């Protein structure tokens, strides 16, 4: 599960939409449309699923445990 993120068209910042989903079900909802209040420019941004992405913590984790450790 991850948070659906969109990019603010004014500032370029990533905004959390407050919607939690996983990437598979998000990809299936191709007609997804919503509005998100932007904390950066204080406007409501309308966005489509094509503008959004799912920020899953699991894909941010980088495995560097094996680096430098002897076998
Ligand atoms: Zn904005």
Image (spheres, rainbow, N blue to C red):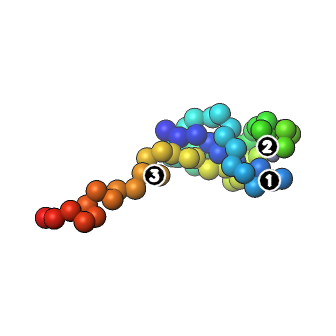
Q: Residues within 10 Å of mark 2 (few under 14, many from 20)?
A: few
Residue 42 picture location, percent across and down: 84, 38
- Residue at image coords 77%, 38%: 39
Residue in the foreground of this view, choosing between 53 and 57: 57
Which mark is first along the chain, 1 or 2?
1
- Residue at image coords 62%, 50%: 53
Element type at marker 2? loop
Circle 3 sits on which residue?
59
Left or right, 71 with reference to 60: left
Residue 40: which numbered mark, if any?
2
Asked if one can make out residue 69 in the rendered structure from this viewpoint, the answer is yes
Establish whether ligand 1 lies closer than 8 Å to the Cβ of label 1: yes
Q: Can you say which quadrant of the picture contains the C terminus?
A: bottom left
Residue 11: which numbered mark, if any?
1
- Spatial CA span between label 2 and label 1: 7 Å
- Spatial CA span between label 3 and label 1: 25 Å
Residue 36 picture location, percent across and down: 76, 37
Asked if one can make out residue 49 in the rendered structure from this viewpoint, the answer is no
Which mark is first along the chain, 2 or 3?
2
Residue 44 picture location, percent across and down: 84, 38
- Residue at image coords 66%, 40%: 16
Residue 12 picture location, percent across and down: 75, 55
Left or right, 70 with reference to 8: left
Q: Of circles 3 and 1, which is in front?
A: 1
């Amino acid at each position: 599960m991850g948070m659906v993120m969109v990019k603010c068209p004014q500032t370029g910042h990533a905004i959390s939409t407050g919607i939690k989903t996983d990437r598979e079900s998000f990809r299936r909802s191709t007609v997804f449309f919503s509005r998100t209040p932007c904390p950066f420019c204080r406007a409501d941004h309308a966005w489509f699923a094509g503008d959004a992405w799912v920020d899953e913590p699991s894909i941010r984790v980088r495995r560097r445990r094996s680096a430098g450790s002897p076998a």
